[in-house]
Image (cartoon, rainbow, N blue to C red):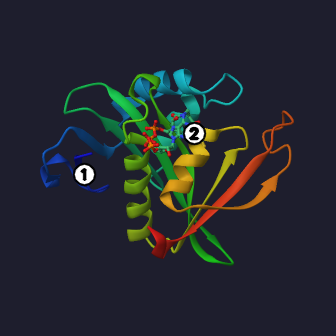
Amino acid sequence: MNLLQNDKNEGAESAIKEEATIIIRPYTQKDLPSIYEIEKNCFSESERYTRQHLEMLGDFKRYFFLVAQENEGSSIIGYCIGVLKSSREGTVGHIISVAVHPNNRRLGIGLELINELITQLKNAGATSFRLEVKMTNKAAREMYRKLGFNYVHILRNYYGDGKDAIVMKMMGNNG
Ligand SMILES: CC(C)(COP(=O)(O)OP(=O)(O)OC[C@H]1O[C@@H](n2cnc3c(N)ncnc32)[C@H](O)[C@@H]1OP(=O)(O)O)[C@@H](O)C(=O)NCCC(=O)NCCS
């Protein structure tokens, strides 16, 4: 899929333009209503972020918050969030969330969002990547496998509702 990708810290002017059909760009405050709509369409009430939580994630500069839209001015069709964390293993890029509107699935948008997020986290110092995904979430597990993530271990009752998570990791030189 062709993309028009903006650098996290720069505006649309600096975009590298290809034959663009999808734009991936940093979140701005005015995206919040659309992001929350996607959240409601993609996650159950107990799993989704509240509007306030999303707003907070968008406000904190340490979060890498990207949105996907079909073209400039069109509605938002997906988003992802990541953050850098220090650990014994060094600087880890933690993938916090990704969601693509149900009408726009299986078009490669999830992959493109996470690929761009990984690039930005890597440029900011991440040497490896980590995430937790619900054991039953086949779509997300398959997407992360396709990106090069491997299963590490299971976190029992991670979501507090008896549902388990799988921890997945990838080294920075894989992607
Ligand atoms: C997971 C999610 C983000 C994937 O987004 P997407 O844009 O549809 O994914 P892509 O089109 O980039 O798919 C990439 C690969 O992931 C895998 N995949 C995606 N959806 C799949 C599904 N329903 N079943 C099996 N594999 C799937 C496939 O390997 C796919 O490649 P292919 O289409 O060439 O076979 C999307 O399904 C979603 O928003 N789900 C609800 C929110 C969620 O669960 N987020 C993850 C939380 S950890």
Q: Is residue 89 above or below residue 49?
A: below
Q: Are marks 2 and 1 in contact (CB under 8 Å)?
A: no
Amino acid type, label 1: Asn
Q: Is residue 4 above or below residue 99?
A: below
Which numbered disc covers residue 136?
A: none
Q: CA distance from mark 2 to mark 1?
A: 27 Å
Amino acid type, label 2: Ala
**Residue at left 85%, top 43%?**
157
**Residue at left 72%, top 26%?**
46
Q: Nearer the viewer, mark 2 or mark 1?
A: 2
Q: Is residue 90 above or below residue 1?
A: below
Q: Mark 2 or mark 1: name the one nearer the start of the chain.
A: 1
How far across and down, in percent of the image, does residue 111 sit?
42, 48
Location of mark 2 (residue): 139
Q: Quadrant of the C terminus?
A: bottom left
Cβ of mark 2 under 8 Å from ligand 1: the answer is yes
Which quarter of the figure has residue 162? top right
